[in-house]
Image (tube, rainbow, N blue to C red):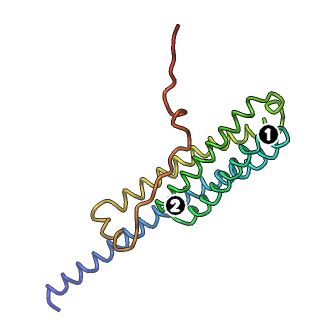
Amino acid sequence: MSYGLISFLGLIAAAVGWSVVVFNRLVRHRNQMANAFAQIDVQLKRRHDLVPNLVNTARGYLQHERQTLESVTLARQRASDAREAAAGARGKTELIEALDRAEAGLTSALGKLSLIVEAYPELKADQTITRLSEELTSTENRIGFSRQAFNDAVNAYNDAIGQFPDSLVATGCGFSPAGHLRSTQHAAERAPVRVQLT
């Protein structure tokens, strides 16, 4: 065997070894992202499970607010369907964006229901409504933490598949960028609080 052939085979073995190491690292990042989504999925499911209880409790008080209750129920169903579609998608951007839109719609519908609850003292005083509202608030906080963990995992994954030379393996093996989950808060809730001194 010639020295050139041995060198060539050595280079091939090194390239294959490097590709295997990179591939395994990319799979680990993808799995971490999937695990982070599983955590947010649990919280979103909890949120979706609380909504029907809240609507059913409020229904007895709000017969004339049927349209609001129906919009909450419909928004909840859309969000639940989008969550299930995104759960198996490994961060597929279009499904994550659809989940974002559906969750924003549910947040908006719940905000309208919350305003109505505030307008009815007897409903606001109901212990079941109070407990469900507190559970929903607690769940929203958990969703925020889970969303941050998911987005951090997405960043690490997207960085790993986008950096050269690892991007060569990522492209060749079908790794594609993942989408981020956006906050479901309304723009007004994210805006700075205005303080006016008299």
72, 191: nearer the viewer: 72
Above or below: residue 190 compared with residue 48: above
123, 37: nearer the viewer: 123
- Residue 21 appears in which quarter of the rendering? bottom left
Provide the residue designation for mark 2.
95
Above or below: residue 129 compared with residue 169: above
> Mark 2 belongs to which amino acid?
Leu
Which mark is first along the chain, 1 or 2? 1
Crowding at dot 1, Cα within 10 Å, few <14 / some 14-19 / many 20+, comes out as few
Residue 101, given in percent of the width and then of the height, sits at 54, 51
Left/right placement of residue 60 relative to residue 34 reads right
Q: Secondary structure at mark 2?
A: helix
Left/right placement of residue 15 relative to residue 81 reads left
Q: Residue at x 28, y 75 (%)?
A: 15
Between tags 2 and 1, which lies in front?
A: 1
- Residue 114 appears in which quarter of the rendering? top right
State the quadrant of the N terminus: bottom left
Q: Residue at x 31, y 77 (%)?
A: 16
Residue 9, given in percent of the width and then of the height, sits at 23, 84
Residue 14, given in percent of the width and then of the height, sits at 28, 75
Provide the residue designation for mark 1.
64
Q: Residue at x 56, y 55 (%)?
A: 99
Task: Measure how far apart labels 2 and 1 are at the Cα level.
Answer: 36 Å
- Residue 127 appears in which quarter of the rendering? top right
Q: Give yes or no for contact between labels 2 and 1 (Cβ–Cβ under 8 Å).
A: no
